[in-house]
Amino acid sequence: MIIEPKTRGFICITSHPKGCEQNVLNQIEYIKSKGKIGEAKRVLVIGASTGFGLASRIASAFGSNSSTIGVFFEKPPTEGKTASSGWYNTAAFEKKAHEEGIYAKSINGDAFSNEIKQQTIDLIKQDLGQVDMVVYSLASPVRTHPVTGVRHKSTLKPIGEPYTNKTVDFHTGAVKEITISPCNQDDIDNTVAVMGGEDWEMWIDELKNADLLSSDFTTVAYSYIGPELTEAVYRKGTIGKAKDHLEKTAFTITDLLKEINGKAYVSVNKALVTQSSSAIPVIPLYISLLYKVMKENNVHEGCIEQIHRLYTERLALDKVPTDAVGRIRIDDLEMRSDIQEQVSALWEQVTEENLPSIGDLEGYKTDFFNLFGFNYDEIDYNSEVDEMVNIPGLQ
């Protein structure tokens, strides 16, 4: 079939297998160009099929020949309908890993569930014995609690009072004001239940109880802080409460790991175009301006560059550098004072008319469609392509 991008709101409902493969190959090439990252490890990546999770799996496998197990929840293809991009990403990753003799297997299902945790435990026991690292990179809007059975849904709301600011429809370039009503306590509780640290702790607890964590084990989860510009809807909103909980959980998990000299970290990463960030009002406009400034200052990074720097300049050190509250800050370039001052100045003057010149909306759009395998110069999108792609190591 010939596959074209079809969008619905902030998501693309089609994905291109060859384009997704190109996305993965580009990231692999980048990692290989940087040389060996470290010794081979056994790595479990929870949320392994897109964004920072996918980049973490690629960096682990192709930077140090690490064996990886990836857990994700993706839609497989059916005749005449494409799979989700994460499915095609994983298929391309595993194909390349297996060609180079690197162990890679995957589990597709609800990572919040007891069943998927047990299936993962069984696979680790069978194939790896133990794991040396767990990357926790889930970005789901809903969670069915494995104990209570309650279905929690996260929300993107400010706390206390309505929030009004500019945003952009990145498909049309229309800049407009948006007002978001404040949350109630249930909104906060549900968002923390989905995006906080409880599930991360459950994973580590179950793996430890099954004796599947090696000595000097490390786990890292990903978070975001962002600038004052977005804090009302992000860091000081419902999502911020969840991120606070996630970050506190790192200390709880580190205490849990004391007997094996293990450590848990939260890495605060840069604002990037992801399926999740595209859904958050205000953020697409902020990223469009940020991209312009960071590219002009030669400090722009994508997911793979961020994760390579996290692995080599932070996690590889004997003493991992953290901020005053124990977080790894790989958002340091984004949050540089000169970068933020330039973005703030552009924010004050941005309009629908001048955004194409003072911002990088085209860069935002390109990154968005790249997530789904589109807008790669190397791919002929007028050619027929087989949508029925299998993941070689799917369990």
Image (tube, rainbow, N blue to C red):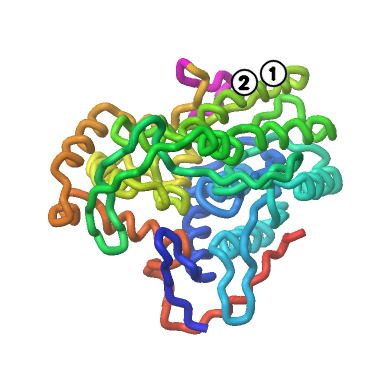
Residue 176 lies left or right of residue 74; in this view the side is left
Q: In the rendered image of this protein, does residue 151 appear above or below residue 310? A: below
Displayed quadrant of residue 137: top right
Which three-letter amino acid code belongs to the residue tagged 1? Asp
- Residue 194 rendering spot, x and y as whole percentages: 59, 41
Circle 2 residue: 251
Q: Nearer the viewer, residue 138 or 54?
A: 138
Q: CA distance from mark 2 to mark 1?
A: 6 Å
Residue 218 is situated, as x and y percent measured from the top left of the image, at 66, 29
Q: Identify which residue is drawn at 27% across, 45% down.
A: 295
- Report the quarter where the C terminus lies: bottom right
Question: Magenta stretch: residue 319 in it?
Answer: yes
Q: Within 10 Å of the Cα at label 1, are there few (<14), some (14-19), or many (20+) other Cα atoms?
A: some
List the residue tagged with mark 1. Answer: 255
**Tag 2: Cα neighbours inside 10 Å, few (<14), some, or many (≥20)?**
some
Q: Amino acid at mark 2?
A: Phe
Can residue 311 be seen by looking at this rendering? no
What span is in magenta?
312-324
Residue at image position (44%, 43%) is 156
In the rendered image of this protein, does residue 322 appear above or below residue 284?
above
Where is residue 236 shown, x and y percent of the image?
40, 30
What is the magenta segment's predominant secondary structure? loop
